[in-house]
Image (cartoon, helix red, strand yellow):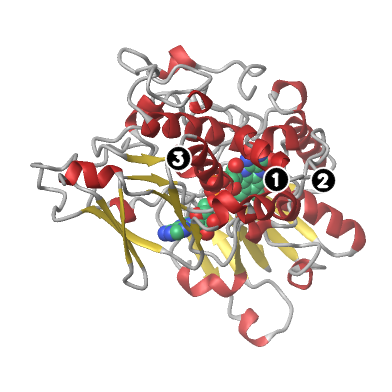
Amino acid sequence: MSIEYATRQLPVVVIGAGPVGLAAAAHLTGCGVPPLVLEAGAAAGAAIGNWRHVRLFSSWRDNVDPVAARLLDTAGWAAPDPTHRPTGAELIEEYLLPLAKLPPLADRIRYRARVDGITRLGLDRTRGAGRDAAPFVVRLADGTEHLARAVVDASGTWHNPNHLGGEGLPAIGETSATAYLDFALPDVLGADRAAHASRHTVVVGAGHSAANTLLDLVELAAQQPGTRITWAVRRTRVDPVFAPGDSDALPARGAIGTRLRQLIDDGQITLESGFVTHRVTVLPSSRTAATGPAVRLSTRDGRAVVADRVVVATGFRADHRIGAELRLDVDPVLGASRGLATLLDPDLPRSWSAPPHGVTELRHPEPGYFVVGIKSYGRASAFLMATGYRQVRQVAAQLAGTTAATRPARCHPTVPVATGVAGRTAADHRPSPVAVFR
Ligand SMILES: Cc1cc2nc3c(=O)[nH]c(=O)nc-3n(C[C@H](O)[C@H](O)[C@H](O)COP(=O)(O)OP(=O)(O)OC[C@H]3O[C@@H](n4cnc5c(N)ncnc54)[C@H](O)[C@@H]3O)c2cc1C
């Protein structure tokens, strides 16, 4: 038996059982390609489990993958109201857990299986001969190895948050100040209430995690006198970050922009714009007094904010270390695949997303390795699950057969696979606000 033939008999390893990894498994199954899902956490949706209390800005209609929904329907799933916007907890309990328990997928998922590295059998990154035919080796943290014919990396970005420092490096003093820092999305109305009630919190960052925390803190301030809120952003204006009202493609997101503007104008949130955090200092009084300001954030030009706690909501970035022995072509600005990066303009407001794209844009020089889901966007922040579902539909179709004629009909992509990127610029693909996510 040739190596190539044997490789084709191997499963496609999917890394991560988040919404996009599970959708990948559903699509691969539908295409007749056996998946093996390796999930670091103890259950499906482990990363979302960290923001269970947050309400999504997209509704069930856009949060459920169509092929996964069909599998669930067959098993008698009570589909949620398509117009309702679930919380993270609802997304897990009403969709991801039931999906992961379905017989075609349940046996194909391994939990507490953290992938540590990926390579090719018998080859390191420098060796080219026989590379395409050699199986992938996917190694777990416990030393177990799985062979795979292809790898779909849907491992997300949750475990790789950006630093507090506004220039990309950690702020000076960041490590010593961790006792006073909350990384994205503390539950300030629930489990983390005591740390923020009647205290001064500074929220750093300008994405939707920051917005969620700010709105929850405003609610806390209404219940708990003495709660103060400062919002520190690098940009000199927040409007381009949050497109208020009608100018956002998703109404719930636009409403957040409008509300934040009002809260700043009403003085409920103090805005520090153009604030590039350089240093964080733990104040001597915080070591002796139970209350009182604990930390000072300062910029290079001498501006400072003194607060009790800092919420670091500066976003996330893709971590490509597990693919270090693969041949990757990563955009130097965004850390996305170079093809996809041409569609993701870092200067666009966060309310915009890339237009539908093909599998070509996801390709790396390493054949058979695809990064999908939120990790595929690198440092770009406007990823939506609906985009990930379209990605995995196309990747599964690609892996199921090289031509449309030989590919099973049920896994044909809805948009052309080979869209190519040659000669295109980001400007050619600037999305329209109404057409992006449908
Ligand atoms: C607060 C918040 C709100 C959001 N709201 C919306 C919204 O309203 N609508 C929308 O469309 N999108 C939203 N998003 C963006 C995005 O759609 C979600 O983050 C979504 O969870 C991304 O899905 P994913 O499958 O790509 O990654 P994840 O959900 O992060 O899943 C990745 C999985 O991989 C696992 N994993 C990580 N590393 C490894 C490893 N080395 N080995 C094995 N497993 C690993 C993780 O445990 C996790 O289960 C939101 C994001 C955040 C943070």
Query: Mark 2 to mark 3: distance in Å?
Result: 41 Å
Q: Mark 1 points at which residue?
A: 211
Query: Mark 1 to mark 2: distance in Å?
Result: 16 Å
Q: Nearer the viewer, residue 320 or 224?
A: 320
Looking at the image, which residue is at 67% across and 38% down? 69
Q: Is residue 6 left or right of residue 227?
A: left
Give the mark toward the camera: 3 or 1.
3
Residue 68 image position (x, y, % from top left): 62, 40
Q: Which of marks 2 and 3 is nearer the N terminus?
A: 2
Q: Residue 158 carries which label?
A: none
Three-letter code, disc 1: Ala
Query: Does the closest atom of ligand 1 sit within 8 Å of the Cβ of label 3?
Result: yes
Q: Name the residue under label 2.
A: 267
Q: Which of marks 3 and 1 is nearer the N terminus?
A: 1
Image quadrant assignment for residue 20: top right
Q: Mark 3 points at which residue?
A: 372
Three-letter code, disc 3: Val
Q: Is mark 2 on a helix, strand or loop?
A: loop
Three-letter code, disc 2: Gly
Image quadrant assignment for residue 41: bottom right
| 57, above or below 313, in the image | above
Looking at the image, which residue is at 48% across and 61% down? 279
Give the mark toward the camera: 1 or 2.
1
Residue 386 image position (x, y, % from top left): 60, 33
